[in-house]
Image: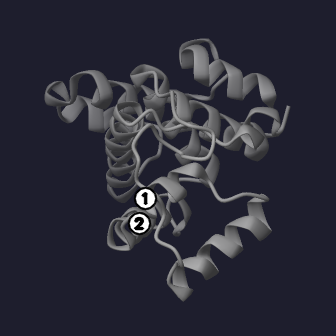
């Protein structure tokens, strides 16, 4: 189990002092979230790795997309549920609760998205993300066509695939390093 002052079970302390740009990014996190997410603290032992991680995360999760922020967070939770990633389930489950205003949706996605009250678009998106997580080599044109049928564009399908792929990677890193979510996440949007 990770030490309380370290975000992972690895002894990789943050660069001290942080470069000005990194410190500014962490200050924005503190201002907007009330904390610096432990995943950022975990990567802060190597600023190049941190910058690479935040660059792709910010592009996938925050940049303009045909997918809403909530939809992207829903993908993160479903992938993390299948992978049983404690960090991402807690952190992104809190984001789903906050963005949806529906704590039941957040809990259903964490436990079993198939029992959640979803529309056809969301169901197709999450079915695709789940299949990517459990059997990506078995995805075929009918799987992509099912997404098109409910209104997703090819650019949206690209984004669904990339968000699911990113969380499959981060889940594995978080699990392998015993990354622990910030305590604040547990009580958010309940």
Query: In the figure, 162 relative to 34: above or below?
Result: above
The label number, if any, that marks residue 8 in the structure image: none
- Count of numbered circles on the image: 2
Residue at position x 63%, y 26% from top? 118
Q: Nearer the viewer, residue 177 or 4?
A: 4
Secondary structure type for disc 1: helix
Check disc 1 and report the residue beneath it. 43
CB-based contact (under 8 Å), mark 1 and mark 2: yes
Taking the image as shown, residue 115 lies to the left or right of residue 85, namely: right
Image quadrant where residue 104 sits: top right
Q: Quadrant of residue 43?
A: bottom left
Tell me residue 1's x, y (percent).
51, 27
Protein image colouring: one colour
In which quadrant will I find the C terminus? top right
Residue at image mark 2? 50
Q: Residues within 10 Å of mark 1 (few under 14, many from 20)?
A: many
> Seen in the image, is 30 located left or right of residue 179?
right
Residue lying farthest bottom? 20
């Amino acid at each position: 189990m990770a030490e309380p002052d370290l975000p992972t079970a690895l002894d990789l302390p943050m660069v001290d002092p942080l470069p000005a740009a990194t410190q500014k990014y962490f200050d924005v996190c503190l201002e907007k979230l009330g904390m610096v997410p432990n995943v950022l603290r975990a990567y802060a032992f190597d600023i190049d790795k941190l910058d690479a991680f935040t660059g792709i995360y910010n592009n996938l999760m925050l940049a303009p997309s045909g997918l809403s922020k909530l939809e992207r967070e829903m993908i993160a939770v479903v992938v993390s549920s299948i992978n049983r990633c404690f960090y991402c389930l807690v952190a992104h489950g809190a984001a789903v609760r906050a963005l949806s205003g529906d704590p039941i949706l957040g809990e259903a996605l964490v436990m079993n998205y198939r029992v959640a009250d979803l529309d056809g678009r969301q169901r197709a998106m999450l079915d695709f993300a789940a299949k990517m997580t459990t059997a990506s080599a078995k995805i075929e044109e009918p799987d992509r066509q099912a997404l098109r049928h409910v209104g997703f564009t090819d650019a949206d399908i690209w984004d669904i695939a990339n968000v699911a792929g990113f969380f499959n990677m981060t889940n594995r890193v978080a699990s392998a390093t015993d990354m622990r979510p910030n305590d604040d996440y547990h009580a958010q949007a309940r």
